[in-house]
Image (cartoon, rainbow, N blue to C red):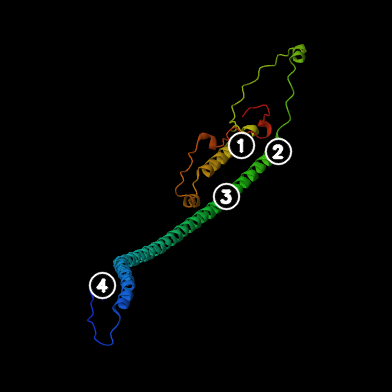
């Protein structure tokens, strides 16, 4: 490519015949040289700009590669984190489900055991109530028989003795009996027990027997109650749990004003 200086310094040999007019050629080459100079300068500027653009393009291409690598690395890291999070979530969900199932099974077992203990306690309590009711009915029957016996003893009692009138006896004349021979001592039969004393003794014995039976019944520990509540401690019995029947009164011995 010609430079503007080469064009300006270009010379032509003169032709003898059929040559061009030198002035005409010079007039044509002068503006052409100026235009060529302008175009040459613009071309140089454009080449320098193109070089800068090429360098920028190469820089951008290198940055693009780095950015692509960074994006790919970030994508891989994000995918790995998501996969790890999903695995961890699945593991936590499985552990939570297993733990919940175990706790539910344990709770159901405890509820079943407690329900069984409650049923055993109800059964033992029902048996104990039946025993108490049976014993109470027996004692009520015994008390009814004692009442009937007491009424029969009252019917058999002798009539009350007439009070001794000392004034009437004092007004009677004194009669001195004649002495008689001392009679021979005859064997006396053994004194019989008064009906009232026999009745009192029988009543006290029966009351004592009732007291012993109820004491044993109140102090008994049923095996079913122990099995129903193995962890519970039996309540300590005090003297208030024992019913005293030694002061019971029946028939003629009954005193409504008595405090016992």
Tell me how far mark 1 sits from mark 3, CA to CA: 24 Å
Q: Describe the element under mark 4 as helix, strand or loop.
A: helix
Q: Earlier in the sequence, mark 1 or mark 2?
A: 2
Please name the residue that numbered disc 1 is placed on: 203
In the displayed structure image, the side of residue 148 where residue 78 appears, left or right: left
- Image spot of residue 176 (x, y percent): 70, 14
Structural crowding at the residue carrying mark 2, measured as other residues with C-alpha within 10 Å and reported as few (<14), some (14–19) or many (≥20): some
Which labelled disc corresponds to residue 151?
A: 2
Query: Do the CB atoms of the residues marked 4 and 3 lie less than 8 Å apart?
Result: no
In the image, is residue 108 above or below residue 202?
below
As drawn, which residue projects farthest toward the front? 16
Closest to the observer, 54 or 245: 54
Which is nearer the N-term, disc 2 or disc 4? Answer: 4
- The mark that comes first in sequence, 2 or 3, is 3
Could you tell whether 258 is left or right of 35 in the image?
Answer: right
Q: CA distance from mark 2 to mark 4?
A: 172 Å
Q: Nearer the viewer, mark 4 or mark 1?
A: 4
Comes first in the chain, label 1 or label 3: 3
Q: Name the disc covering residue 131, or none.
A: 3
Front of the two marks 2 and 3: 3
> Can you identify the residue that label 4 sits on?
8
- The disc, 4 or 3, on the residue closer to the chain's N-terminal end is 4
Of 157 and 132, which appears nearest the observer? 132
Work out whether 129 lies above or below 59: above
What is the spatial separation of the Cα atoms under label 1 and label 2, in whole angstroms? Answer: 13 Å
């Amino acid at each position: 490519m010609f430079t503007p200086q080469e064009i300006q310094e270009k010379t032509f040999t003169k032709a003898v015949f059929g040559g061009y007019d030198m002035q005409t050629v010079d007039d044509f080459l002068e503006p052409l040289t100026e235009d060529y100079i302008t175009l040459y300068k613009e071309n140089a500027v454009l080449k320098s700009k193109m070089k800068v653009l090429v360098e920028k393009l190469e820089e951008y291409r290198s940055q693009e590669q780095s950015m692509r690598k960074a994006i790919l690395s970030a994508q891989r890291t994000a995918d790995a984190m998501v996969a790890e999070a999903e695995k961890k979530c699945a593991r936590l969900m499985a552990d939570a489900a297993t733990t919940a199932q175990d706790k539910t099974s344990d709770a159901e077992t405890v509820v079943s055991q407690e329900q069984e203990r409650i049923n055993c306690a109800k059964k033992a309590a029902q048996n104990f109530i039946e025993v108490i009711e049976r014993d109470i009915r027996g004692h009520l029957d015994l008390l009814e028989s004692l009442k009937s016996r007491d009424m029969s003893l009252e019917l058999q009692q002798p009539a009350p003795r007439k009070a001794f009138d000392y004034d009437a006896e004092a007004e009677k004349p004194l009669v001195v009996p004649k002495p008689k021979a001392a009679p021979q001592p005859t064997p006396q039969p053994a004194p019989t027990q008064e009906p009232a004393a026999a009745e009192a003794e029988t009543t006290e014995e029966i009351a004592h027997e009732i007291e012993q039976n109820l004491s044993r019944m109140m102090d008994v520990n049923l095996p079913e109650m122990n099995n129903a509540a193995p962890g519970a401690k039996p309540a300590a019995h005090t003297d208030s749990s024992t019913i005293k029947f030694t002061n019971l009164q029946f028939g003629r011995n009954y005193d409504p004003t008595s405090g016992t």
